[in-house]
Amino acid sequence: MSLPELGAFLRTRRDRIRPAEVGLPHGPRRRVPGLRREEVAQLAGLSADYYTELERGSAKNGVQPSAQTLAALARALRLNGDERDHLFHLAERPIPPSAHGPSAHVQPALLGLLDRLSNTPARVITDLHETLVENDLALTLLGKSPAHRGPTASFVYRWFTDPQTREIFPPEDHPHHSRVFVADLQAAAARRGRDAEVTKMIAVLRRRSQEFAALWDTHDVAVRRMDHKKIVHPTLGIIELDCCALLSEDGRQRLLWFTAPPGTPGAEQLELLSVIGTQDLGVTKGTAPVGSSAAEAAEDAEGPPDQGVAAPVPVEVGPARDSR
């Protein structure tokens, strides 16, 4: 691995990004036109010391960026597909698929829109409902996404295999969400064709969930572009919101954002979210409970989960704070 070349590439990419492009204030004492090192580290979910060492191209502390770290840096630095691949080449890491899994490269157009949704809970997910990146308000509203790889990275998979995942919605709404998730997955499976990832996930779900198997056999199909949701929040109670989706051109990724009509209780609760922050979220929604569910999911993924994989990185859109 050529650490000096890797560091030089990171530095030139950092210099070209203006703070406003990633939702950061310019500030009166900024001496560089681009981002500071600590700002890149913040956006990528890394320590400032680690990123500084990486950019300087020094191996004295054994700096060896993982694929997850490289993916986070690609998002933070708004790299296009060619630049992302080059970053992985320089680090001598295998280039991951561009649109699969929680380490997928977020499409720049969706990431740019996410940056501008500073007052709205928003996240980018794959067509298998794997969270790629989210803003602080999404963390406050929905809780942290679990740090999983394989089938358990998918919210749809966890919906049918982990009862705790369903606590985010009122019980009376569960049948509706089950139908919508399966119909949306039907569309994703058809779009992907003979994709091994989705084929295996469907097979496992049919085996583990009678509800999923019955809904899958109806062959109902519908891409979810908008839905009305009641979200159970640990502090604010039930929040009624509209969930809108903007799909990428290939349909593999989508930007989700949550809104409420002005003057409604949901709109008032959204205003409170920015005040509450993430400090009250003592429970991570959607994570596997202690017991057989996590072990079974790991077995379904044909191997133990990657302990070094971090959760999707929040996009900071205001003053820095510890949201983890």
Image (cartoon, rainbow, N blue to C red):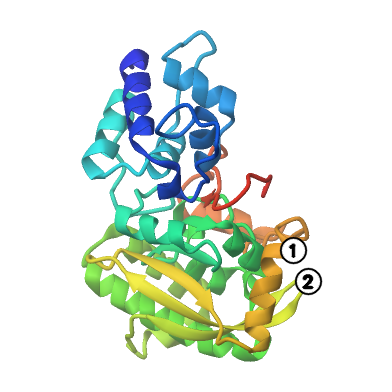
The x, y position of residue 280, in whole percent, is: 78, 60
Disc tally is 2
Q: Which residue is mark 2?
A: 235
- Mark 1 and 2 residues: CB-CB less than 8 Å, in contact? yes
Q: In the picture, residue 93 is in which quadrant?
A: top left
Quarter the N terminus occupies: top left
From this view, report whether residue 318 is shown above or below residue 63. below
Q: Nearer the viewer, residue 67 or 39?
A: 39
Cα gap from disc 1 to disc 2, whole angstroms: 9 Å
Identified at 51% across, 42% down, the residue is 43
Count residues near mark 1 (Cα–Cα under 10 Å), then give few for <14, some for 14-19, many for 20+: some
Q: Is residue 63 above or below residue 223?
A: above
Name the residue type under label 2: Thr
Query: Is 312 placed left or right of 16 in the picture?
Result: right
Q: Which residue is found at the position 49% from the left and 30% from the top?
A: 36
Snapshot quadrant of residue 92: top left
Q: Which residue is mark 1?
A: 276
